[in-house]
Image (spheres, grey):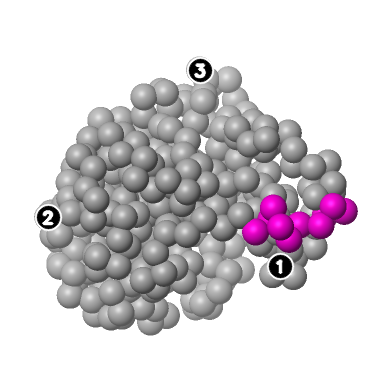
Amino acid sequence: MKVLYVCSAARCGSTLTDMFLGGHPRATSLGESNFLAKAIRVGERCSCGALVRDCPDWRAVYQRLAAWGFDVDDPYRFKLWDAVAWTYIDQAHQTRAFLAEVKLRKGWMALRDRLPAPLRERAPLPAAHRRALANKMRLYEAVAAAWDKDVVVDSSKNVREAVELHRRDPDTVRILLVTRDGRGVYLSRRSSGRDREESVRGWLTYYDRALALLRAHVPQRAWMQLKYEDIAGDPQRAGRTLCDFVGLGFEPSMLQLDATVRHMVNGNATRFAPGKGIALDERWKRDLDPGELSWFNGRGAHMNAALGYR
């Protein structure tokens, strides 16, 4: 089994990438698996159309995880990495107390990130994170066995989790950093009613953290950057690159997103509409007016350059 953990900021193509490689006959898409318990509890649908709770393919996974304490009637007992929902919130779980715990763990991890490497090694992960890493590997193994796959794709997007998973099992876990031109992200978020600063801050913060952590703690052979624009603009070439990275032979069937039934949790609505296919969205080149473009460049041009965009 190999794992490809997809990291990206919001609206940068992680769901598309998950679906794309997950269309390979020997690979499978999980979506944002850290939201598995929430999806079960609030009655969300698997991308196959069934409820995540009742999907026969997921049920086969649950049976394999029962030995590790998984219970579909109490799915949060099977601890995974912290994930905070913004839509379809499980109010009974995502309480103020839970959010306070998450904030504390994030604060500790942020302090840990700033330590020199020798000191960082001595700073322990929170117990909840150690348990989550063990369970995540159990989840991957259960999926690979139950669904008879060689590569499991997880687009949970948490770069700290990705780094720690690789450090836990460096022979299994590979990390893909999917990037998108910040001007496209900016337009997308502005079109959704976000203010200027909010439309760029998350993208900037995410990639600033991701580049620093990956370069410092993951060997170059174990992670790679791939641009959304390359995936959507030349999917065959991007598909060969991805397959080489995880040790698969390229399959042309990957180019047809609707050729495969997937069992993805969370992510954007693209997972329910594979028939739309792979299409490059660069509307910012047409729709971003000069004033908005100038403002973005003042805040985000340096990161765009760092990610290889002109």
In the displayed structure, does residue 82 sit left or right of residue 22? right
Identity of the residue drawn at 47% across and 35% down: 225
Q: Residue furthest top?
A: 118
Q: Label 1 vs label 2: CA separation?
A: 41 Å
Nearest to N terminus: mark 1 or mark 2: 2
Which type of secondary structure does the marked residue at label 3 adopt?
helix
Residue at mark 3: 118
> In the rendered image, which quarter is residue 254 located in?
bottom left
Q: Quadrant of the C terminus?
A: top right
Q: Position of residue 291 (x, y in %)?
A: 87, 53
What residue is disc 1 on?
191
Up/down of 259 relative to 131, above or below: below
Please give the name of the residue rendered at 65% of the width and 59% of the height, measured from the top-left corner.
Answer: 283
Marks 3/1: CA–CA distance: 45 Å
**Where does the magenta region start and end?**
283-292
Residue type at mark 3 is: Pro
Pointers 3 and 1 in contact (C-beta within 8 Å)? no
Residue where numbered disc 2 is placed:
148
Helix, strand or loop for the magenta stretch, by majority: helix
Would residue 294 be found to the left or right of residue 90 on screen? Answer: right
Q: Amino acid at mark 1?
A: Ser
Looking at the rendered structure, the secondary structure element under dot 1 is helix
Name the amino acid type tagged 2.
Answer: Asp
Select label 1 or label 2 by which is in front: 1
Q: Quadrant of residue 179?
A: top right
Q: Earlier in the sequence, mark 3 or mark 1?
A: 3
Tell me: residue 52, above or below residue 255: below
